[in-house]
Image (cartoon, rainbow, N blue to C red):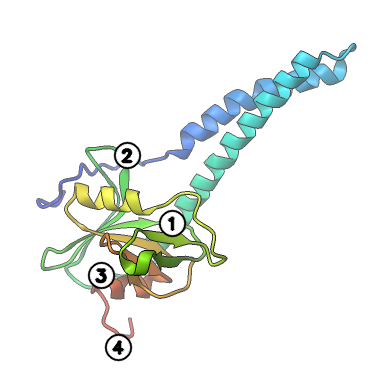
Amino acid sequence: MDKHSDGDHHNKAFAPWARDFKVGTIFSVPGALLLAYCYSHRPLSIEALLAGLGLLGIGTLMLKQGYLRWSGKQIEQSSIKSLKLPAHWTSKPNFMLSTGGDIDLYLESPDGERFAVEIKTIQGLEVKHTWMGFGKTELLTPGGKKLKEDPIPQTLRNAEAVSATPVLWLPKASGKTVKTKSGVIIVQGNRKRLLKAVGAKSGWSLW
């Protein structure tokens, strides 16, 4: 591990969706069995029917959440694999933190500047500064709606754990690279935009 790193980097994969799949299965299977029982037995037991629907519903939601997390990880990994860093840059994907969780991508420049990159599958983003730039920064969808989950706190928290510059990378989005009042660099676009944002690619470079 890099001597400057404050995180605890291991080869152990961080797979938060595994619990979702496990819990979803635990709820879905008995729920489905209860519904099958209701279908094949008469008179119909309303209690068993409601219990089956409830269990299956909870299980389905957990499985869906697990799938979304898993698919997001696939996009994250393919985005990381697409990066081609200049010589002497350090890249550590899935950088485990001693405080729990991981940084999707830890980067360090030859001069020691660190970047903690969080990768999200958000398709598009608008950054809105309220109260003429003095209020809280809001992240909105292209349609003007608030995001269901704000990724800024996680990005800041993970970057702080390793004394790095926080970067939020949205490889599936398209838009300008902006910096929030809290110091988070939001990159919307492909790997070239990310590399340029962290200073690993000049504006005129062809690679």
**C-alpha span from label 2 to label 4:** 38 Å
Cβ–Cβ under 8 Å for marks 1 and 4: no
**C-alpha span from label 2 to label 3:** 27 Å
Q: Please, what is the three-letter code of the amino acid marked with disc 2?
A: Lys
Q: Quadrant of the C terminus?
A: bottom left
**C-alpha span from label 4 to label 3:** 15 Å
Mark carried by residue 198? 3
Give the residue displayed 24% in from the left and 53% down from the top.
159
Mark 1 and mark 2 lie on one chain; the one further toward the N terminus is 2
Q: Which residue is mark 1?
A: 120
Q: Is residue 91 above or below residue 178?
A: above
| Front position among marks 1 and 2 | 1
Cβ–Cβ under 8 Å for marks 2 and 4: no
Cβ–Cβ under 8 Å for marks 1 and 3: no
Where disc 4 sits, the SS reads loop
Where disc 3 sits, the SS reads loop
Cβ–Cβ under 8 Å for marks 4 and 3: no
Q: Which residue is mark 2?
A: 12
**C-alpha span from label 1 to label 3:** 17 Å
The answer to whether one can see residue 33 in this image is: no
Residue at far right of view: 42
Mark 1 and mark 3 lie on one chain; the one further toward the N terminus is 1
Q: Quadrant of residue 67?
A: top right
The answer to whether one can see residue 2 in this image is: yes
| Front position among marks 2 and 3 | 3
Mark 2 and mark 4 lie on one chain; the one further toward the N terminus is 2
Q: Please, what is the three-letter code of the amino acid marked with disc 3?
A: Val
Q: Which residue is mark 4?
A: 204
Q: Quadrant of residue 91?
A: bottom left
| Front position among marks 2 and 4 | 4
Q: Left or right: where does residue 86 sit relative to residue 46?
A: left
